[in-house]
Amino acid sequence: MKSMEEMLKAAQQAAETIQKQMTEMQGKLDDMEVEGLAGGGLVKIRCSAKGRVIGVAIDDSLIQPSEKGILEDLIAAAFNDARAKADQVSGEEMARMQSGMGLPPGFKLPGM
């Protein structure tokens, strides 16, 4: 039978391993890119799977003062599309990592 000290040491090592994997996962998610589209591709927003905006592309046809309101709406729509895709990629990566650690699907790790 293991002593309490051995069990605490094992639990600490497991926690450190999980923390390291979580840090690596956060870095990996920030390196993964998704692209949100709006207006049939007239506005594109690239962001990391963590949701950091990397770039915005706007078709020249929208750069007219009379189209300002439409452009603003399309930028918001493209960002929301990119954010939804980032959340999906992030969720898939987290599920993959949790599965590899033997955690049940949907288990919420602290800090996530």
Image (tube, rainbow, N blue to C red):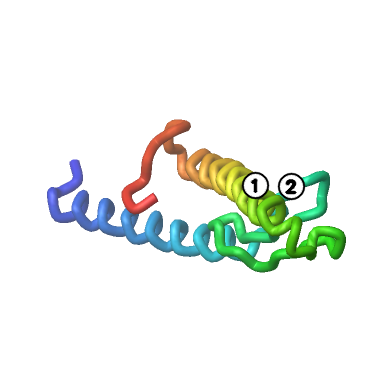
- Residue 102 is situated, as x and y percent measured from the top left of the image, at 46, 38
Quote the CA–CA distance across marks 2 and 1.
6 Å
Residue 93: which numbered mark, if any?
A: none
Within 10 angstroms of label 2, few (less than 14), some, or many (20 or more) residues?
A: many
Sooner in the amino-acid sequence: mark 2 or mark 1: 2
Q: Which residue is mark 1?
A: 77
Between 66 and 63, the one lying in front of the other is 66
Between 48 and 44, the one lying in front of the other is 44
Say what amino acid the circle numbered 2 marks. Ala
Q: Residue at x 57, y 58 (%)?
A: 29
Q: Is residue 18 left or right of residue 89?
A: left
Q: Is residue 104 left or right of residue 2?
A: right
**In the rendered view, would you say 16 is above or below 100?**
below
Q: Is residue 54 left or right of residue 51?
A: right
Between 69 and 3, the one lying in front of the other is 69
- Residue 107 is situated, as x and y percent measured from the top left of the image, at 39, 36
Between 32 and 67, the one lying in front of the other is 67
Q: Residue at x 71, y 55 (%)?
A: 71
Q: Residue at x 52, y 45 (%)?
A: 94
Give yes or no for contact between labels 2 and 1 (Cβ–Cβ under 8 Å). yes
Q: Which residue is mark 2?
A: 38
Say what amino acid the circle numbered 1 marks. Ala
Q: Residue at x 54, y 42 (%)?
A: 91
